[in-house]
Structures are given as C-alpha cells and as structure tokens.
Image: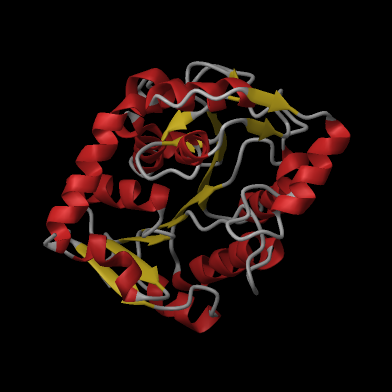
Amino acid sequence: MARDSVVVLGGSGFVGRHVVARLVAGARRVVVPTRRRESAKHLILLPTVEVIEADVHDPAALDELLRGAAAVVNLVGILDPVGGDSFERVHIELARKVVAACRKAGVPRLVHMSALGAAADAPSRYQRSKAEAEAIVATSNFAWTVFRPSVIFGPGDRFLNTFARLSAALPIIVLAGAGARFQPIHVGDVAHCVVHALTTDLTAGARYDLCGPKAYTLRELVTYAGEITGAVRPVLALGPALSRLQAAALEILPGKLMSRDNLRSMQVDNVCACAFPTVFGIAPVALEAIAPQYLAPAAQRSIFDALRARSGR
C-alpha cells in the first residue's frame, strides 16, 4: 500500500462516503474496507479509491490494511447493539485494535469519530462506550484527533428523514424526550473537518465538539420536518414514565426507532458549549439551508424519479 493512502474505516456509511469523496477531491489515495463489497459499490468507481472486503474486527486483517498507510480515519459506530455488534465490540474493542494496528504498522496519524456527550459518567451506555474509546485513542503515542459531533443531518440521514416518514404516516406524533436539545451539524461540515485535520499538525492531540449554528428541542425538529414535507402533525409530548415505556416498546419492534439507552442519552443536552473551531476555516451551515433540499416534496419526487429511471421503469 502506498504511504500516501488513507484507510477509512466505516467509509461506506453515511458520514464515510462524504469523507471519502472529499479525500478523492484532494487527490488522496483511499482504502475502504467493507464486509461486503456490494455495500460500497457507490465508491468503487471513484478514482483513487480501493474497496477491499475485510473484517476490520480481525486484528490480522487490520494489520494488512494499515501496512504502509499514512493515516487512518475510524468512523465506525452504532447507536444500538445489533446482533453480535455490541457497544463494547464496535466502539471500545475496535478502538483498541485500531490503535494496536497503527502502532504495529507505524501509521503516524489517526482521526477518530466519537460523539458529543461522551463521558465516563454519562447516563447511557452508548455515551460511556464512546468515552472509553476516546480514552484509548488519547493514550496512544501518535498524532490523533477526536471529533465529537452533535446529531448529523444531510441527504440519507437517519435523523430528519425518520421524522419526515413518521409525519407522513401518522396522524399524531407521540414523542418521548420531546424537550431534549440538539444542535445538528451538516454531514458536509463534519467531512470537511475530518479531511482538514489530516492536513495540519495543529489538530494533533485535540478533541473537537462539532455543532451547527442553532440548537433545537426534539419537538421543534419533528415539527420542522413535518413543515418541510407538508405533513405537519400534532406532537404529544410524553412525561418521563411514559417516555421510558415507549422506548422499551420501540426497542423490541422492527426498525428500533428508539431504545431505552437512546432515551438515557437525551437526558444530557446534545449542544456545544463553545463556538465552532476556527482551525477548520468554515462556518457551519444552517439546518434550514440544507434540509429542504432533500426533504421537500419536490426533492423527494426527484429522488424517486432518479431511482425509477435507474431501474428502467
């Protein structure tokens, strides 16, 4: 592997594909490991991108992937345990394996994606596991950078798109944690920061909280998604006891819209206590400037027409 290559773990995911595209635009060689090559087919045709079928949880596979790389970007994460993928395995154990593989391969640079609210004493297991992974990265001996974004929005997100689908399908939205506060950041801004961090030593050994320009309650975000899609619905906010009951019910249903651990995460406001980091040279884009571009009915029809044309119908 060429010494100028960047290995992006989680490169086929929502944030990953934006990071990979920006690396390609900067003429960087990119390696994207994936369990199934088919899941990364949207990246295969990009110039300077090599998609490799590999299990990143296998230390031997990691050693091979990282040999000769200039940097590693770890974007792998889950919101809820799925099958054999627990918070311990995906967040903590993988961070430990990546650090060990970087040390063995002599990789000088590591960028790690954490989450806003990560703390050893946080109320949710998700947040605590993210904090433990951060600690593993921060105690390594090479140049590392940690990003802690609030919820990330953009085309294909599982955030505003979920609210839009619920608004279209239900006559009323029964909402747990309606007063929880978030400061959403655009996926393009997150990708910009990740790629920029690889270009300067100023970001080495630093952790950055990433938020958009405005904070919202969950109720406000659900209402806004309905307004964009033309399906505004009444929102019935649940109290703490009923919120826990709803979360317990939803976590066992297909799709898992919410879990009790998600609800515990929302006990802490997901907002930034500081301004956007000036080292990245951008001002974060507003939610209202982007969301209508992919949630408005006209945008949804365009997406549907494109998919239909692609399928030959």
Residue 113 percent coordinates (x, y): 53, 48
Q: Is residue 87 left or right of residue 44?
A: right
The residue drawn where x is 53% and y is 80% is 58
Q: Is residue 101 left or right of residue 36?
A: right
Quick check: can you spot residue 189?
yes
Q: Quadrant of the N terminus?
A: bottom left
Position of residue 274 relative to residue 63, above or below, is above
**Residue situated in front as seen by the camera: 195 or 57:** 57
Q: Quadrant of residue 196?
A: top left
**Residue situated in front as seen by the camera: 87 or 245:** 245
**Residue situated in front as seen by the camera: 214 or 160:** 160
Q: Residue furthest front?
A: 171
Quick check: can you spot residue 27?
no
Residue 302 percent coordinates (x, y): 20, 39
Position of residue 13 relative to residue 162, above or below, is below
Q: Residue furthest right?
A: 241
The residue drawn where x is 30% and y is 52% is 20
Q: How is the image coloured?
A: secondary structure
Q: Quadrant of residue 242?
A: top right
Residue 4 percent coordinates (x, y): 26, 59
Q: Is residue 252 left or right of residue 17?
A: right
The residue drawn where x is 24% and y is 46% is 304
**Residue situated in front as seen by the camera: 225 or 132:** 225
Position of residue 230 relative to residue 47, above or below, is above
Residue 129 percent coordinates (x, y): 71, 53
The residue drawn where x is 51% and y is 58% is 76
Q: Quadrant of the C terminus?
A: bottom left
